[in-house]
Image (cartoon, helix red, strand yellow):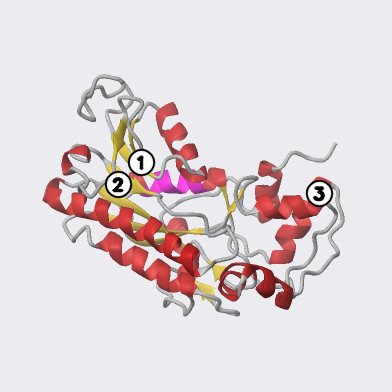
Amino acid sequence: MPEARTPGDDRRAGDGRRVVVAGSSGLIGTALVEGLRADGIEVTTLVRRPPEAAHEVEWLTDAAPLDPAVLDGATAVVGLNGASIGRFPWTGKYKNTLLWSRITPTQALARAVRELGTDAPAFISASAVGYYGSTPGQKLVESAARGESFLADLCGEWEAAALGAGEQTRVALLRTAPVVHQDGVLKPLMLLTRLGASGPIGRGAQVWPWIALDDEVRAIRHVIDSELSGPVNLTGPTRATANDLGFALAVRMNRPFALRAPVWGMKLVLGRDATEAVLTADMDVVPAVLQASGFTFAHPTVEDAVAAAVPPAG
């Protein structure tokens, strides 16, 4: 086992900053850590197993709280923990997993940040656009009210846990849209498309928030580097429907887009909560805070995002 060292003792040449990341093994976390390190920023990762490298710190494997010293001297701590909402069906047991995997780590991070007082790093905590629920016909900026669904309630509890870090530190809440990537929202859609079985989901006209992985990571780094606090919508700047995304994928893969998936069938197979909160929800989420702060998107349309994520059919 590598010799134990206090995080921050061996800072890279970079700009001397250090970022602590929880949830670094997921799609977004992996890309964020790689990007930070590529730019010479030191990253400490919190892992739920014995550490295998000097930059890893074990946590949440017993009842012991996270030692605030792990965060001391960091520029920011980024919490990205959470079991996938893309796993179906949402049984009662899996709903508990969705809750525990978000609330427990966030509470632990917030507690450690709070204990550092005025010397605490910024706390950048994940949330999701599911906060708004299905709200057809509305443009949802960060000041919009929380919706009414299991996922909206989950996001509300998640954000409340993050705000437990206290008023002495900057807390940003990342209301992230489904990520357009082969290991993100495209994973099940690509399988159906490859089999020639893709088509409208329900009526298909429901507005789906989305974001490219590259822009997701760039946006998180923008929030870290800025003074943004409170909710920040991490979603693409151009409105897209479920049909827009599905059709763009079918064109990219040179496959048909014709077979409609009935809502009643999805509810039967996937469950009502998952179907209504994810697949048939209608949410026109606008990245108002990001855009007002000067952020620009590398992939401004869902077609751009699909093209960046999926190689063209040969």
Location of the C terminus by quadrant is top right
Closer-to-camera residue (56/137): 56
Query: Residue 37's x, y, as percent?
Result: 41, 29
Q: Is residue 312 above or below residue 56?
A: below
Kindly report the distance in space between the C-alpha atoms of the residues bearing marks 1 and 3. Answer: 36 Å
Query: Residue 182's x, y, as percent?
Result: 65, 45
Identity of the amino acid at label 1?
Arg
Closer-to-camera residue (285/269): 269
Q: Which residue matches tag 1?
A: 48
Label 2 or label 3, whichever lies nearer to me, is: 2
Chain-order first, disc 2 or disc 1: 1
Decide whether residue 219 is among the magenta residues.
yes
Query: Residue 97's x, y, as percent?
Result: 44, 60
Q: Is residue 104 above or below residue 308?
A: below
Identity of the amino acid at label 3?
Arg
Decide whether residue 274 is among the magenta residues.
no
Identity of the amino acid at label 2?
Leu
